[in-house]
Image (cartoon, rainbow, N blue to C red):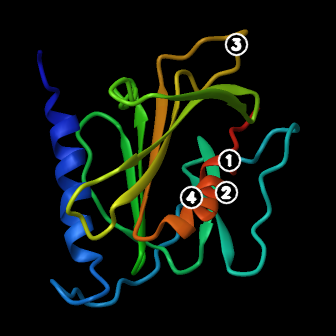
């Protein structure tokens, strides 16, 4: 089995981020400055983005898609090789996304397939043994385009969190994904 270098890099970044998010000590990093995404193209008519409410904000990812996250999650810069990647961290939660041709298809996980913003998506849940942020959920969009026009681009978003009670927050993040029509 051939492992793609980009996947190794992304998982390395997630592992490093997990160690840095320890609320009970561990490596402490200086507070991150919030970063704003550059303005993307105007959203075409169609399904509106999920509106952020009390303690939530909507993140636009270069006009390709948007999603909502709690305001406590701050963007941390990560380098990408062949895709668009982002990472947002807070004291008890982390969100990592990968948009491109080789986005993780979550094949190693059992999950359910449902539609989010009119696109087929696989949603999975998992546990990470011996990790500070030991619970996780992820969504994989097999194609970011609607069925009538296929796209080689895919999207995978991981939400990793410290307590099982945060699962509704992770679900809300994953369900909030919106694509321009």
The quarter holding residue 58 reads bottom right
> Which mark sits nearer the N-terminus, 4 or 3?
3
Q: Are marks 2 and 1 in contact (CB under 8 Å)?
A: yes
Identify residue for label 3.
147
Q: Is residue 140 above or below residue 131?
A: above
Give the foreground label among 4 and 3: 4
Spot occupied by residue 122 in the image (x, y as percentages of width and height): 55, 29
Q: Quadrant of the C terminus?
A: top right
- Between residues 129 and 63, which one lies in front from this camera angle? 129
Give the foreground label among 3 and 1: 1
Any part of residue 39 in sight: no
Identify residue for label 4.
170
The kind of secondary structure element at disc 3 is loop
The kind of secondary structure element at disc 1 is helix
> Which mark sits nearer the N-terminus, 1 or 4?
4
Q: Are marks 2 and 4 in contact (CB under 8 Å)?
A: yes
- Between residues 94 and 126, which one lies in front from this camera angle? 126
């Amino acid at each position: 089995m051939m492992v793609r270098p980009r996947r190794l890099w992304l998982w390395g970044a997630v592992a490093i981020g997990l160690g840095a998010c320890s609320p009970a000590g561990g490596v402490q990093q200086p507070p991150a400055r919030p970063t704003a995404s550059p303005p993307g193209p105007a959203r075409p008519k169609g399904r509106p983005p999920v509106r952020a409410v009390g303690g939530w904000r909507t993140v636009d990812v270069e006009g390709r898609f948007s999603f909502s996250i709690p305001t406590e999650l701050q963007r941390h810069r990560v380098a990408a090789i062949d895709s668009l990647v982002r990472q947002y961290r807070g004291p008890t939660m982390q969100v990592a996304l990968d948009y491109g041709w080789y986005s993780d298809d979550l094949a190693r996980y059992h999950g359910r397939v449902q539609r989010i913003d009119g696109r087929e998506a696989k949603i999975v849940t998992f546990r990470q043994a011996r990790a500070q942020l030991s619970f996780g959920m992820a969504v994989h969009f097999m194609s970011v385009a609607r069925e009538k026009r296929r796209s080689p681009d895919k999207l995978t978003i991981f939400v990793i969190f410290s307590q099982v009670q945060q699962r509704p927050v992770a679900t809300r993040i994953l369900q909030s994904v919106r694509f321009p029509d």
